[in-house]
């Protein structure tokens, strides 16, 4: 039986390859492509907190990711209930697994991030669960 997580990962792969144009795929240098690794992250929020999470990402988090060497690839909210009410799925690119580890360490220690997180959670915790999967693109992917 296929799990919900497997379905989400498959859907993300389909969405990414559909959304990204051939021009975008050609613009990625081959040397960088071999080193890049993708991280697929799924956040589940407390009830009613998805708008707060989206605002935090929109206004702060994506910029802080870039500051710490992470490349924002895409962000999605499922269209079907119940996940449409409490789930954010996104993909980041990193130069390597070690670079990802260092980027996350630096991000979590960033004074701006700590301030934003505390302010956004003044009325309670936002995220209840985080799933992270690292993946390499196949040789036939539109993005590498």
Image (cartoon, grey):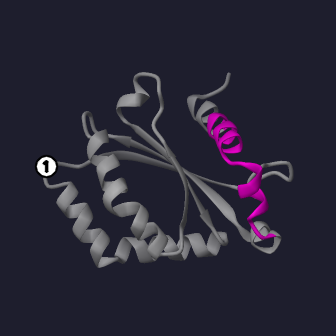
Magenta segment main secondary structure: helix
Q: Is residue 96 above or below residue 73?
A: below
| Residue bearing mark 1 | 123
Q: Is residue 132 magenta?
A: no
Seen as rendered, the residue at the extreme front is 23
Seen as rendered, the residue at the extreme left is 123
Magenta-colored span? 10-29
Displayed quadrant of residue 47: top left
Judge from the rendering whether residue 116 lies leftward or rightward of residue 12; answer left or right.
Answer: left
Judge from the rendering whether residue 117 lies leftward or rightward of residue 75; answer left or right.
Answer: left
Q: Is residue 142 above or below residue 8?
A: below
Q: Residue at x 57, y 70 (%)?
A: 100
Disc 1, SS: loop
Q: Position of residue 21 (x, y in %)?
A: 71, 48
Q: Within 10 angstroms of label 1, few (less than 14), some, or many (20 or more) residues?
A: few
Q: Position of residue 65 (x, y in %)?
A: 45, 67
Q: Position of residue 23 (x, y in %)?
A: 75, 55
Q: Position of residue 77 (x, y in %)?
A: 45, 37
Q: Nearer the viewer, residue 137 or 3?
A: 137
The C terminus sits in image quarter: bottom right
Q: Is residue 144 above or below residue 89?
A: below
Count the marks: 1
Displayed quadrant of residue 114: bottom left
Q: Residue at x 79, y 68 (%)?
A: 34
Q: Residue at x 41, y 29 (%)?
A: 84
């Amino acid at each position: 039986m296929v799990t919900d997580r497997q379905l989400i990962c498959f859907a993300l792969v389909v969405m990414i390859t559909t959304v990204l144009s051939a021009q975008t795929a050609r613009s990625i240098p081959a040397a960088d492509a071999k080193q890049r690794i993708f991280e697929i992250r799924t956040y589940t929020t407390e009830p009613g907190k998805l708008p707060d999470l989206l605002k935090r990402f929109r206004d702060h988090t994506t910029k802080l990711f870039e500051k710490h060497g992470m490349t924002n690839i895409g962000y999605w909210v499922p269209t079907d209930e119940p996940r449409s009410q409490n789930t954010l799925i996104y993909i980041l690119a990193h130069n390597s697994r070690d670079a990802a580890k260092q980027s996350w360490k630096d991000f979590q220690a960033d004074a701006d991030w700590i301030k934003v997180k505390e302010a956004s959670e003044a009325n309670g915790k936002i995220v209840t669960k985080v799933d992270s999967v690292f993946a390499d693109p196949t040789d036939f992917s539109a993005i590498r």
